[in-house]
């Protein structure tokens, strides 16, 4: 119980959803404010881009101003900040979801979005992530679009949900 409280204190509070991958990168650079460039490099390598939301998380984690981080990014051609994705699609990778077919959901999502997990579509409208157990084993396999979870779904359901989200985004352009 005490261990859980310590971990929660390290998680930035303004970040919408902090993935375990991003948290592990932050914990690696805890108390190392001089290592911003390697931290940014790891985030870019892991996720394919640095988003505005990532910037908020970085400022909170390192307790550095947003202005300072933006200045560092401006000095390095390999970095740029992209807008926050409109939609993040997550596929649960917990053992129960795996046994119930989450691998097929992930394969379908990759095909529909034409990206690998951890990356975003060039137009920054969608990002695909694989997440550890979301705790909804009773409705496995689970896929989430933003903060809406869908359970007991198959590949055709995943395909339909992603197509619907794409259609919604295109209507809002």
Image (spheres, rainbow, N blue to C red):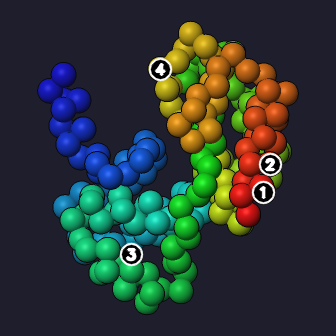
Name the side, left or right, on which 68 lies relative to 157.
Answer: left
Cα–Cα span, label 1 and label 2: 5 Å
Q: Which residue is mark 1?
A: 170
Residue located at (64% from left, 30% from top): 143
**Element class at badge 3:** helix
Return the x and y of residue 49 as percentages of the image width and height.
Answer: 56, 66
| The quarter of the displayed image where residue 66 is located | bottom left
Cα–Cα span, label 4 and label 1: 32 Å
Cα–Cα span, label 3 and label 4: 35 Å
Between disc 4 and disc 2, the foreground one is 2
Between disc 3 and disc 4, the foreground one is 4
- Residues marked 1 and 3 touching at CB (< 8 Å): no
Mark 2 surroundings within 10 Å by alpha-carbon count, few (fewer than 14), some (14 through 19), many (20 or more): few
Q: Which residue is mark 3?
A: 37
**Element class at badge 1:** helix
Q: Which residue is mark 2?
A: 167
> Which is more N-terminal, label 2 or label 4?
4
Name the side, left or right, on which 78 lies relative to 100.
Answer: left
Q: Which residue is mark 4?
A: 135
- Residues marked 1 and 2 touching at CB (< 8 Å): yes
Cα–Cα span, label 1 and label 3: 35 Å
Return the x and y of residue 81 as percentages of the image width and height.
Answer: 51, 73
């Amino acid at each position: 119980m005490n261990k859980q409280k310590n971990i929660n204190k390290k998680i930035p509070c303004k970040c919408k959803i902090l993935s375990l991958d991003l948290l592990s990168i932050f914990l690696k650079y805890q108390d190392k404010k001089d290592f911003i460039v390697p931290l940014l490099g790891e985030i870019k390598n892991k996720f394919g881009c640095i988003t505005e939301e990532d910037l908020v998380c970085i400022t909170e984690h390192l307790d550095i101003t947003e202005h300072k981080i933006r200045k560092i990014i401006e000095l390095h051609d390999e970095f740029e900040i992209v807008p926050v994705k409109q939609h993040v699609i997550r596929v649960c990778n917990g053992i129960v979801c795996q046994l119930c077919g989450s691998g097929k959901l992930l394969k379908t999502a990759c095909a529909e979005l034409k990206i690998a997990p951890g990356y975003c579509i060039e137009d920054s409208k969608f990002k695909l992530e694989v997440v550890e157990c979301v705790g909804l084993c009773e409705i496995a396999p689970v896929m989430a679009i933003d903060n809406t979870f869908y359970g007991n779904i198959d590949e055709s359901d995943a395909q339909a949900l992603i197509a619907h989200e794409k259609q919604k985004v295109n209507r809002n352009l």
